Image (cartoon, grey):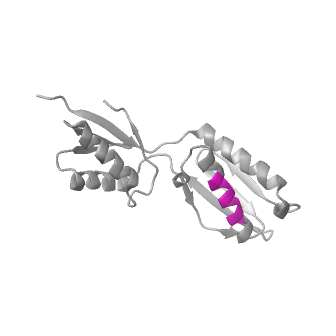
Amino acid sequence: MAKDSSFDIVSEFDMQELRNAVDQVKKEVATRYDFKGEHTEIELTDEKIHLEAVSDFKLTAIHSVLTQKLINRGVSPKILDLGKVEPTSNGNVKQDVTLIKALDQDNAKIISKLIRDGFPKVKSAIQGACVRVSSAKKDDLQAAMKMVKESEEVTVPVQFTNYR
């Protein structure tokens, strides 16, 4: 009997690359003409990015710069969960952007269902913050990888690890 091959589907990112991207955004915002003399604040913690600017328009500009810097550094912008824009007491607007660090149960169920529906001979099991996918045929596993990566239903970035 052939031994099953398997891999894990996880959602993680390199925190150092995120720090580098945020540092680049801070430098660019500090030197851009349209931000000269205006209060902007970009603060990264382990759980979120706090943004503050003088208007919604400036906040949108910071988002676009951040997205571009993340893409340039190889980090998926899907890790950003944009919060609600709120006014501050000094007339500015602020926003907290939560970082998506793990595969949540809803997305794990979506991934598992996609694999079950698309590939009946491939087994998928949710194991905490990852989905273990196994099959006797490696071609089926590679096709499942491609399908999950291209799916519009999965709202978090996915990586494939522990390939055996």
Location of the C terminus by quadrant is: top left
Q: How many marks overall?
A: 0
User: Is residue 81 in the magenta section?
Assistant: no
Considering only vertical position in the picture, is 88 above or below 156? below
Residue at image coords 78%, 48%: 27
Of the pair 52 and 36, the residue shown nearer to us: 36
Please name the predominant secondary structure of the magenta segment in the image: helix
User: Is residue 61 in the magenta section?
Assistant: yes
**Segment colored magenta:** 59-68
Q: Residue 30 appears at what percent x and percent y?
A: 82, 53
Residue at image coords 70%, 59%: 62
Of the pair 94 and 163, the residue shown nearer to us: 163
Q: Seen in the image, is 60 located left or right of residue 36?
A: left
Of the pair 9 and 98, the residue shown nearer to us: 9
Location of the N terminus by quadrant is: top left
Q: Residue 153 appears at what percent x and percent y?
A: 38, 60
Residue at image coords 34%, 45%: 145
Q: Residue furthest left?
A: 1
Q: Is residue 25 visible?
A: yes
Of the pair 73 and 11, the residue shown nearer to us: 73
Q: Residue furthest front?
A: 139
Q: Seen in the image, is 122 located left or right of residue 35?
A: left
Q: Residue furthest right?
A: 37
Q: Seen in the image, is 141 located left or right of residue 85?
A: left
Residue at image coords 53%, 49%: 76
Q: Residue 33 appears at what percent x and percent y?
A: 85, 61
Q: Residue 79 appears at what percent x and percent y?
A: 53, 51
Q: Is residue 108 visible?
A: no
Considering only vertical position in the picture, is 119 above or below 88? above
Which quadrant of the figure has residue 117?
A: bottom left
